[in-house]
Amino acid sequence: MTNSSKVLFSPIKVGKHDLKHRVVHAPLTRVRCSLNGTPSELMIEYYKQRSTDGGLLIAEATNISRLANGYKHSPGIYTKEHIEAWKKITDVVHEKNATIFLQLWHIGRAGASSLNPNCEQTVSASDVAIQKGKHVFTGKPYEKPRALEIGEIKSIVQDYRQAALNAMEAGFDGVELHAANGYLPDQFINSSSNKRTDIYGGSIPNRARFSLEILDSLVEAVGTDRVGVRFSPGNDFQDMYDDTPVETWSYLTTEIQRKYPDLGYLHFIEPRADFFDENLVNTDDSLQPYRAIWKGPFIVASGFSTARQHAIDISEKTGNLVAFGRAFIANPDLVERLRNDWELNEYDRSTFYSATDHGPAGYTDYSFYNESK
């Protein structure tokens, strides 16, 4: 008994690309680059292993500029060296007839001044620091950021535009704006981190303005069908909170549907999922308010790696694409395992964020089903 007849394994069009199934490789930070953000040779094999005929991969969050970074060994897309290294990855993905988008990233207040080239202060919508937890690399409490000035905001929008053009030069099929998980665009969207009183703060349209301006710049640069957006409505990761989440993200979704109905896709993260809770299983569907507005390809994410039947059911019910993270890390042949209802390899969380000197362990050494069985 297989799942081949399920909607999850039926064709769908994303942009100009005819996908043969709806299992999506989620954007996964793995910090396997050099310290200057250049993708490593090991990453070529990782993406090659997880590419499937007619499949969609969203490459890991990638810094749009030297000051967008906050994680050691995370990739960039702002130098010629970055572009050339990414070309090797997109080439092997395309050899397997797969589609790959690059997630564009600015970390904002989640960074650390000590990780910036000249110890520049971190920036955000407002001078509001993350209160919960400590920085993953410094081990220190998060720093108080500096509120961006309007001229700087306009400059960062242009950084996103240039990053998208660089991604096209590197051979990507499209780009995804990372406007989720408490990073810079999300810091503008949420009322807890945005205390501005100018055109970028206060009302929902004002707090949404930065993300929509970035979207405008990406569409202008590379075309509507080559752009996707990732949102995380109601997600509290990295101290996020919004007073009216359904209203806020419904506004964003409505504006995108109105202005860019042919956008490549929208990608939503379930708000109740906790990436760090091993026992949390995805059983709910809280994204219907946005699904009811957006008429294009809709990707759902978060918690499906431990709830494969729920993933199949959601796709069956809605026709959505489903993004998998942890399960794709441990199962390079995840698509076939899900299609045939084969058991999954267990993942090793201790290797998720190992630096390049750790080699292939927990990265490219997971077995394929036929090899292990």
Image: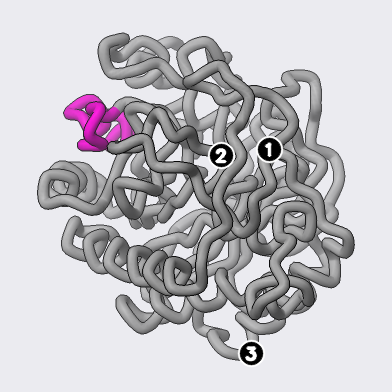
Q: Which residue is mark 3?
A: 258
* Position in image of residue 126 (x %, y %): 64, 56
Q: Is residue 205 part of the magenta span, yes or no?
A: no
Q: Secondary structure at mark 3?
A: helix
Disc marking residue 130 = 1
**Image x and y of residue 288, in percent:** 82, 64
Establish if 342 lies above or below 98.
Answer: above
Gap in Å between the C-alphas at discs 1 and 3?
Answer: 34 Å
**Mark positioned earlier in the residue sequence (3 or 2):** 2
As drawn, 197 above or below 33: below
Residue 7, visible in the rendered structure: no
In the figure, 155 relative to 62: above or below? below
The residue that label 2 is drawn on is 110
Horizontally, residue 291 falls left or right of residue 119, namely: right
Q: In terms of secondary structure, where does tag 1 sit?
A: loop
Image quadrant in which the C terminus is located: top left
- At 80% from the left and 26% from the top, the residue drawn is 280
- Amino acid at circle 3: Arg
Q: Amino acid at mark 1?
A: Ile
Residue type at mark 2: give it. Ala
Q: Which mark is residue 8?
A: none
Q: Earlier in the sequence, mark 1 or mark 3?
A: 1
Q: Per the image, is 47 magenta?
A: yes
125 or 70, which is in the foreground? Answer: 125
Tell me whether circle 2 and circle 1 mark residues in contact (CB < 8 Å).
yes
Marks 2 and 1, Cα distance to the nearest angstrom?
7 Å
Question: Are the two marked residues, 1 and 3, in contact with CB atoms closer than 8 angstroms?
Answer: no
Query: What residue sits 76% from the left and 75% below the top?
Result: 204
User: What's drawn in magenta, residue-wise?
Assistant: 33-49
Name which residue lies at 70% across and 71% down: 201
Specify whether residue 268 is in view.
yes
Q: Residues within 10 Å of mark 3 (few under 14, many from 20)?
A: few
